[in-house]
Image: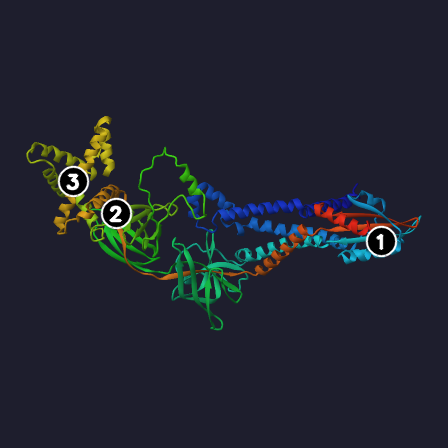
Amino acid sequence: MSSTTPQAEPTVRAGRLHAAVELLASMRFAIALLTIICIASVIGTVVKQHEPYANYVNQFGPFWAQVFDSLKLYAVYSAWWFLLILAFLVISTSLCIARNTPKIFSDLKQYKENIREQSLQAFHHKAQGHWAEAPAQAAQRLGQMLAGGGWKVRLQSRQTADGEGWMIAAKAGAANKLGYIAAHSAIVLICIGGLLDGDLFVRTQMWLGGKSVYSGGGLISKVPEQHRLSERNPAFRGDLMVAEGTASSTAILSQSDGVLLQELPFAVELKKFIVEYYSTGMPKLFASDIVIHDKATGEKKQARVEVNHPASYKGIEIYQSSFDDGGSEVTLHAVPMGQASKPFEVTGTIGSSSELTNGKEKLTLEFTGLRVINVENMAGNNTATDVRAVDLRSSIEARLGSADKTVTKKHLRNVGPSVSYKLRDAAGQAREYNNYMVPVDTGDGVRVFLLGMRETPSEPYRYLRLPVDENESLDGFVRLRAALGNPEMRALAVERYAAKAVDPKRPELRGQLAQSAQRALGLYAGQEEVAGKKVWGLQALADFLDVNVPEAERSRAGEMFVRILNGVLYELDAAARERAGAKPLPQDMTQAFMTQSVMSLSDAPLYPAPMALMLKDFKQVQASVFQVARAPGKTVVYLGCALLILGVFAMLYIRERRLWIWLTPAGQGLQARMAMSVNRRTLNADQEFEQLQSRLLNQEDPSA
């Protein structure tokens, strides 16, 4: 027993090793790996890679964001499991090639001329013929005919009971099996190229070279050395942002938990950035005129970088990726949105911050963006639509015809520059604002300033629309809102309205109307509570009617309240103008201004900031964002793609065929048996065999 155990253990280990190799080299294992890679690639396409973790929390929630982070779904292509799968796919495909290539080359050399006569009867394509010709002569003639048709031919002489027989073995389309080798080799090359151009070298330096991700802030020059990659890094892909008139030589490699800095052997100086737009506001062309400064030699090289037209230097490609603000200078005018605020101006550069004080409250103003061009769809449908109406003809015509037809009409117009900023409180909570520099015509004859606000970057902006006065400014609205919050001005407006609205012959109605006007204006100004809660604006009037007026009378009472409110607000605006020494509102814009003011005053308390910072002046400085990449695997991938195309073409469009003709003596002539095999049975194979049969066997005078 003990003597057989040492011999059994190596046999078991050899069996397990053989089973593991068979599994790795099997097609089902390779297909399973390809399926996982495809699923991972879909995830990497759908989920934005290397974003800040807070963005994923906002998108997926805290629980799923943590689960996805543990699976490395935010950096799929550099995840350890993805690289491991690629490595196993390379090993599996290489084993397939290593195991099958010797067989393929051996098969390419063989003509299989030793096939037996009885075996020819088992083929699908088979035929017979009889000639009055010697077998040797017929073999030479048929061999020459096949060779002239592109076949490779071998002749074999055999002795039979009836005399000397000849076997003609021919083959064509051997490149089909070479296509198998080319296609599988292409998969290996593409995977190797992907590994070379991926984060493999970066990860290796982090694992073995002591490099780590930097998650702090500050100047690039102050980042410690352990977060910087050498100029000799064999493969990387990062972003390089350069403002006009400046130069940079350090690229940023974004990681899910921070960044790595990649030093370049040269500096890129941006001389001029050029951008052109379509009518839709989308960029039509953006290009950069740059100067490349070699750090080692001091050489200068001028180049122009456009989309799909990169510049190359020392094996590093410089692509035009996008553009950004390069530190534009802006001057903002603060428009008070509350009673305690006062107008002031503040200047800064995009990307910087400034401290503001609102009484005891301290705010941090962060200048986040400047957009000089904003193209918006100003087409509006202000007509009411009957939902019961069905216009079948219009519905069909809207969806047929040329490809440029759409159901929604568009009227695109540049509405001017806008500035975005954040106001951050002492607790670190911030809201983002986006305000337009010039008023916008909304399509109904009312020109308004748009003040946008959102709580988080994932939300769209919600806009407050403030009407402009006769001077194209917000002074009229600000003055009217300040008067609405002043009890003395409200009382004066109510008195004026009541005096003008009541017939002097009926003085007893004046007090009642004044009381109703005072109640409506007080509710609208938020000075009264309804059902125990503080409300304002049109919602306050609606809540008051719901609580105090029977349902049957609410419609008539609501119309009365709105008429009274419009009249009192008009008198309030006139009184505010008189006190400020301003001219009366022009008659041609009175109705539009007051109508929009009613809506804006109702919504203004929802604006969470004590002031709106309007863009007064700016000096734009543009920046170009380049993608710099050193990709040693690019050539390998290109070679793999070429082999893949050739291999797939060979496997799909080249058919391997083998042909045998057995010639034996029969009386004064010979008997011929022909058979053909193909790797794929198709109609073309049937037609080719019929042509060969007609050409080789069905000749009335073979010797002719």
| Residue highlighted by disc 2 | 446
User: x, y (%) of residue 587?
Assistant: 17, 47
Residue 325, x across and y down, in percent: 37, 59
Nearest to the eye among marks 1 and 3: give it.
1
Residue at 75% across, 50% down: 657
Q: Earlier in the sequence, mark 1 or mark 2?
A: 2
Q: Nearer the viewer, mark 1 or mark 2?
A: 1
Please tell me whether mark 1 sits on a helix, a strand or a loop.
Answer: loop
- Report helix, strand or loop for mark 3: helix
Q: CA distance from mark 1 to mark 2?
A: 98 Å
The answer to whether residue 443 is left or right of residue 495 is right
Left or right of 598? Residue 164 is right
| Mark toward the viewer: 2 or 3 | 2
Give the SS element for disc 2.
loop
Q: Is mark 1 in CB contact (under 8 Å) with mark 2? A: no
Quadrant containing the C terminus is: bottom right
- The N terminus sits in image quarter: top right
Q: Which class describes the residues within 10 Å of circle 3: few (<14), some (14-19), or many (20+)? A: many
Residue indicated by mark 1: 702
Say few, some or many: other residues with alpha carbon within 10 Å of mark 1 (under 14 / 14 to 19 / 20 or more): some
179 or 130: nearer the eye? 130
Cβ–Cβ under 8 Å for marks 1 and 3: no
Q: Nearer the viewer, residue 251 or 412?
A: 412
